[in-house]
Amino acid sequence: MKQVENHKEEVPFSYYEGLFQKLEPQSALERLPSVTFADNTFHMTLLGRQYAIAWPDYAIASSDGSVPSLPTQTFLLRCLLENKEVLPTGKMLTFREMPWGELYIQPFTGRVLTRAAFTFGTRLEAFCAACEKLGAKKLSHGDAGYEFCLFGSYTMQILVWEGDDEFPPSAQMLYSDNFAAGFAAEDRVVAGDLLIGHVKAAMK
């Protein structure tokens, strides 16, 4: 198990790690057709990176050899334990338009929209270069916009507007409409947070 980074991240990770040991693999596979299971190991892809997750004694390995952060590991565990894959219709939704979006809009705005605006809106060229490097689909919306595959059939879009002397930078994040049925609101917040971190790492 990865060494604990801090108490705030350790507590939820430890909780879901305990639930994971009791998981019936077949139940996860029925909910998540993009996940495979062989030799007591789940195989899944998140933001283009492949993960191998051993069961029932938890251990994780990534395709690039990096050690995933505890929030990433917790998100993957929650996917296996609770989430389900639903086909999208092609429509993209704002966070507020999905169930419980109004209740979680404040943490979403702070953790995702404001962070994205000031991380990417002040470094637009670096943002575009990072998204291109990651293989994201370029969009015509915003001063810069890209679409990413989060997991399975779930896609997310980051739209960024560069700031100027009169207005600060701003950002919007859109989710494929199947998020409304497949992911809880708190997981949608975390997904946005993870996506920003994914792009930010590629800007270094």
Image (cartoon, rainbow, N blue to C red):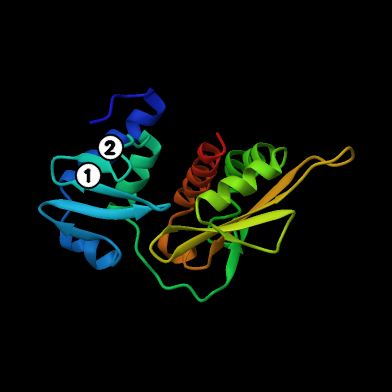
Relative image position of residue 140 (x, y in whole percent): 70, 64
The C terminus appears in which quarter of the rendering? top right
Which secondary structure, mark 1? helix
Tell me the residue that label 1 is attached to. Answer: 19
Q: From the viewer's perspective, is residue 23 above or below residue 62?
A: below
**Disc ID at residue 15:** 2
**Farthest-out residue, right:** 166
15 with respect to 196 (left or right): left
> What residue lies at 13% left-to-right and 40% top-to-bottom?
57
Q: CA distance from mark 1 to mark 2?
A: 7 Å
Dot 1: within a 10 Å radius of its alpha carbon, few (fewer than 14), some, or many (20 or more) residues? few
Q: From the viewer's perspective, is residue 185 above or below residue 5?
A: below
105 with respect to 67 (left or right): right
Quarter of the image where one finds residue 109: top right
Relative image position of residue 76 (x, y in whole percent): 33, 48
Q: Are marks 1 and 2 in contact (CB under 8 Å)?
A: yes
**Farthest-out residue, bottom:** 89
> What residue lies at 36% left-to-right and 66% top-to-bottom?
85
Which secondary structure, mark 2? helix
Kind of residue sitting beneath label 1: Leu
> What residue lies at 74% left-to-right and 54% top-to-bottom?
143
Relative image position of residue 78 (x, y in whole percent): 33, 49
The N terminus appears in which quarter of the rendering? top left
Kind of residue sitting beneath label 2: Tyr
Quarter of the image where one finds residue 182: bottom left
